[in-house]
């Protein structure tokens, strides 16, 4: 479904990704863990075309988002293809980034109507359905500022789902939330995992990763330091390095 | 007390001033109608990624904000006929500009429009730059084009933020229309100064001041309504 090969990325002199390769198959849930500054967000953003890679390749569903030519120059797909590929991916941000001037339902319908060309009624029906799914059917007419952080994040998840992405990315979806509220967001993601949606989740919630992820990627200093099933990585047989990272 | 205790003279003065008010409002209205959209274009030019666009616009804004408006009014007044003749003969595709008659009122309007567009542009630019990157990123991952992102996501939020500074400029504009008097446009301030020097009374100027105050009271109120309209959400 998704294949990233040898992705490199620097910000000025700072090498943030030093050759990261990862593959995600359909229906798989992959958790990315690692200490602050290890490049987790940057990697996710490279997959999403929110950052441009310096080198390496990213392929989604057999279509090439970016590849590197013989001279080592990263070549991105043409504009239309780029758009199509990016629409296969949804993204949920740490700080939600809802559109504050639109009510909750409109946040979810706007792209359906103006990007996918769905009719307004169709979009609204689907929007209502998704709001029910994330447990916010009564908030359709509210504005983001009237919601709690957890509710905002659930709206953001519904907004991403509305475009039927084949791969959903989460960048620390609960890091801005109180511990109790974290659970309501994790419950939604857990539910999505139950539906066998393909997801990549950057998270600091180790218990959640163990429970929900099929595979865990541990990043350190711009590379993948360890990778394995969630049991191998986070179960009782976890490595010394992971133990250190978890502060044991 | 020449006018304030003589009803007939007072009415005559009011009539005289409202006669000049026509041009005052004309300058004001055209400046608003033209400079607000033009300012947005200038702001986008100022933020362009292309240097060849950005730098000339930066220079234009510097001139407009860095020199007195009164000087710009003179400059347009003297240069406009020359410029139009030049454009009309050398650049036929611009010959539609010749439809603008190079009279005093039009010179004033043009000077005001290009001056205020620069100020509005900087207000727009401030509003646009204050937008957090997350809004652009959220729009991008949802597949909105750059134009859609600007029109549907960014601009509506920018407008809410800039209403107050825009209202400041609009209020200043009302008072600045008095500068048109320097190239002898028959607007309200000129009517008032003429009358004042003819009769040696300050009262026409006081009444003119009251007129400006009334206009700005209305504008303040309009902006209050507008700002309240945008109060339905908070960031
Ligand atoms: N736009 C940017 N410009 C410059 N440096 C950046 C930029 N984005 C990230 N960095 C740097 O790249 C490094 C990796 O950042 P990244 O956000 O990917 O880490 P992370 O693993 O997601 O960390 P965290 O757990 O804190 O979110 C950091 O040192 C960060 O300061
Ligand atoms: Mg991060």
Image (cartoon, rainbow, N blue to C red):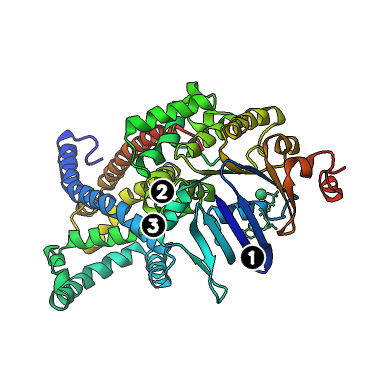
Residue denoted by label 1: A10
Q: In which quarter of the image is ligand 1?
A: bottom right
Q: Measuring 19% from the left and 40% from the top, which residue is drawn there?
A: B14
Q: How many marks?
A: 3
Residue A111 seen by the camera: yes
Q: Is residue A48 left or right of residue B87?
A: right
**Disc 3 or disc 2, which is closer to the eye?**
3
The chain letter for the residue carrying disc 1 is A
Q: Residue B64: horizontal and vertical position, in percent? A: 37, 65
Discs 2 and 1 lie in a common subunit: no
Q: Residue A80, labelled with which disc?
A: 3
Whole-number angstrom distance, CA of label 3 to CA of label 1:
27 Å
Label 2 C-beta lies within 8 Å of the nearest ligand 1 atom:
no
Residue A92 lies left or right of residue A203; in this view the side is left
Residue labelled with disc 2: B144
Q: Distance between the residues labelled 2 and 1?
A: 27 Å
Q: Is mark 2 on a helix, strand or loop?
A: loop
Kindly check if marks 3 and 2 are in contact, taking CB atoms under 8 A apart as contact. Answer: no
Is the shortest distance between ligand 1 and the CB of mark 1 under 8 Å?
Answer: no
State which quarter of the image contains the C terminus of chain A.
top right
> Is A165 in front, or is B80?
A165
User: Crowding at label 2, few (<14), some or many (≥20) Cα neighbours within 10 Å?
Assistant: many
Closest to the observer, B152 or A182: A182
In the orientation shown, which residue stands out farthest toward the top? A138
- Distance from disc 3 to disc 2, alpha carbons, whole Å, reads 12 Å
Which of the chains bears the disc numbered 2? B
Q: In this view, does B199 lie above or below A146?
A: below
Image coordinates for residue A29, horizontal then vertical, percent: 63, 41
């Amino acid at each position: 479904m998704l294949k990233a090969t040898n992705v490199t990325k620097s910000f000025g002199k700072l090498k943030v990704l030093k050759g990261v390769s990862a593959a995600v198959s359909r229906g798989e849930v992959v958790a990315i863990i690692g200490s602050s500054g290890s490049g987790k967000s940057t990697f996710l953003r490279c997959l999403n075309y929110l950052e441009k890679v310096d080198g390496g390749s990213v392929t989604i569903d057999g279509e090439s988002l970016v590849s590197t030519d013989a001279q080592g120059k990263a070549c991105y797909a043409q504009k239309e293809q780029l758009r199509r590929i990016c629409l296969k991916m949804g993204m949920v941000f740490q700080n939600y980034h809802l559109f504050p001037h639109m009510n909750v339902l409109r946040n979810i319908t706007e792209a359906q109507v103006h990007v996918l060309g769905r009719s307004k009624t169709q979009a609204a029906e689907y929007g209502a359905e998704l709001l029910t799914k994330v447990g916010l059917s009564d908030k359709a007419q509210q504005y983001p500022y009237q919601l709690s952080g957890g509710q905002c994040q659930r709206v953001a998840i519904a907004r991403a789902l509305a475009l039927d992405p084949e791969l959903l990315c989460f960048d620390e979806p609960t890091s801005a939330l109180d511990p109790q509220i974290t659970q309501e967001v994790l419950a939604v993601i857990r539910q999505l995992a139950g539906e066998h949606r393909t997801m990549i989740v950057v998270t600091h919630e180790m218990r959640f990763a163990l429970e929900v992820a099929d595979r865990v990627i541990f990043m350190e200093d711009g590379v993948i330091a360890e990778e394995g099933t969630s049991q191998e990585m986070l179960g009782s047989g976890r490595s010394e390095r992971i133990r250190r990272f978890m502060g044991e | 007390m020449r006018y304030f205790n003589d009803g007939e003279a007072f009415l005559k003065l009011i009539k005289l001033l409202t006669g000049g008010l026509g041009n005052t409002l004309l300058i004001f209205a055209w400046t608003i109608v033209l400079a607000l959209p033009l300012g947005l274009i200038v702001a986008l030019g100022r933020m362009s990624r292309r240097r060849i666009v950005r730098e000339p616009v930066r220079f234009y804004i510097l001139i407009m904000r860095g020199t007195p408006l009164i000087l710009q009014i003179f400059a347009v007044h003297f240069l406009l006929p020359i410029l139009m003749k030049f454009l009309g003969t050398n650049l036929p595709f611009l010959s539609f500009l010749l439809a603008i008659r190079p009279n005093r009122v039009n010179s004033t309007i043009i000077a005001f429009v290009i001056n205020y567009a620069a100020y509005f542009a900087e207000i727009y630019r401030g509003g646009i730059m204050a937008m957090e990157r997350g809004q652009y990123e959220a729009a991008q991952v949802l597949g909105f084009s750059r134009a859609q992102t600007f029109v549907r996501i960014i601009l509506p939020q920018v407008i809410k933020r800039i209403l107050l500074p825009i209202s400041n400029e609009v209020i200043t504009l009302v008072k600045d229309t008095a500068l048109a008097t320097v190239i002898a446009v028959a607007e309200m301030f000129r009517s008032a100064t003429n009358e004042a020097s003819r009769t040696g009374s300050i009262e026409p100027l006081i009444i003119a001041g009251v007129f400006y105050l009334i206009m700005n009271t209305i504008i303040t109120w309009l902006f209050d309504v507008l700002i309240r309209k945008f109060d339905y959400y908070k960031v």
